[in-house]
Amino acid sequence: MPPFALAKRAASRKQSIPGRFSNTTESIILMVETISRKVETSHCAIATEMTRGKGLDVVLIHGNSSCRAVFERQLHSGLGEAHRLICFDLPGHGQSEDAREKERTYPLPGLADAAMEVLEALDVRNPVLLGWSLGGHVAIEMASRQPNFRGLFITGTPPVGEDISEGFRGSLLKGLAASSSFSQDQAVQFADRVFGSSATPELVQAAARTDGDFRTTLFSQARVAEKSNQREVVGSTKTLTAVVNGAADQIVNLDYIDRVPYANLWRDRCFRIDFAGHAPFLQVTAVFNQYVAEFLRDVERAEHN
């Protein structure tokens, strides 16, 4: 059987990682001890959680109307044992407070600023950033401010330039991502469209809990906020950048993502994982975690060379 059967070669920039990886979509859930604490920032109190691994510091940033619990299968895995995984609820999400100054915090630059304050409070220096969906945009914005992050791993995130729309397909969420409020039915619809069969009651509740002002402010400020051109950031950064997406993602434009001229693209290609949509870390956890583990090994090897 060819290695990494679930990430079959589709094109020169969509092929599997070299190596012997399992072809199972299931992951083994480990009882990895985590530490939770609230961190005070100038934006709001932010809920954080981390493992005790002794390897690299890896910061995981979730997406719109979600929470840090989406990364449970990474925290409670070999990744969480080997590395210090740090995740947090964005302002207005999960167990974090709603922002005190919403116009300041909820646009992308404010989210990046809040994340940087969290890292400073936790004394996390030069970590690897792993961002999913909106979290990937937050990670790229952070990378535009600090050039010495050890690595950047994005999934479900198109690094967009002036034309934001070209990075997205736009029809699946049908306005839910920018809605000012969710009914229970809308929260269920949102979770189902983002996570598919991996949606859980907890993820539905996370969508329902999210501050509606977050979504409206984020999207209304998307074109006017003083943020970086993310296409230019990944096109000039010296930080090793991994791009791993679900092959069946219906929210982002995968062809656009593959065409972006990355300056330091991991393994010189973007990867697509078969049998996964917008949330591959939940839908094909074992395969996704193998990509992350291999990326972290390459980051460590590069630092020792």
Image (cartoon, rainbow, N blue to C red):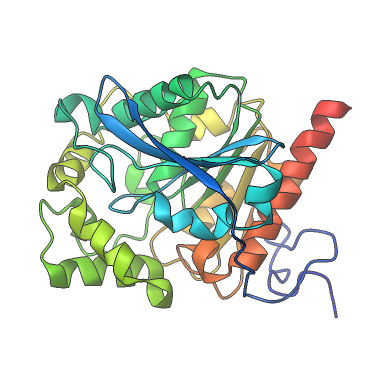
Tell which of 188 and 124 is nearer to you: 124
Relative side of 287 to 255, left or right? right
Where does residue 211 sit, x and y in percent of width and height? 16, 46
Report which quarter residue 17 is drawn in. Answer: bottom right
The answer to which of 2 and 41 lies nearer the viewer is: 41
Residue 244, compared with residue 100, is above or below; it is below
Residue 216 shows up from this direction: yes
Whether residue 228 can be seen here: no
Furthest residue in direction right, as rendered: 305
Asked if 202 appears above or below 213 in the picture, the reply is: below
The residue under the point 36% across, 60% down is: 169
- Residue 18's spot in the image, x, y percent? 83, 59
Tell me if 271 is positioned left or right of 203 in this view: right
Picture quarter with the N terminus:
bottom right
Camera-nearest residue between 139 and 172: 139
Residue 110 x, y percent position in the rendering = 30, 26
75 w.r.t. 122: above or below: below
Looking at this rendering, what residue extends furthest in the bottom direction? 1
Residue 85 screen position, x and y as percent: 57, 42
Pick the quarter of the image with the C terminus: top right
Give the quadrant of residue 200.
bottom left
- Nearer to me, 198 or 145: 198
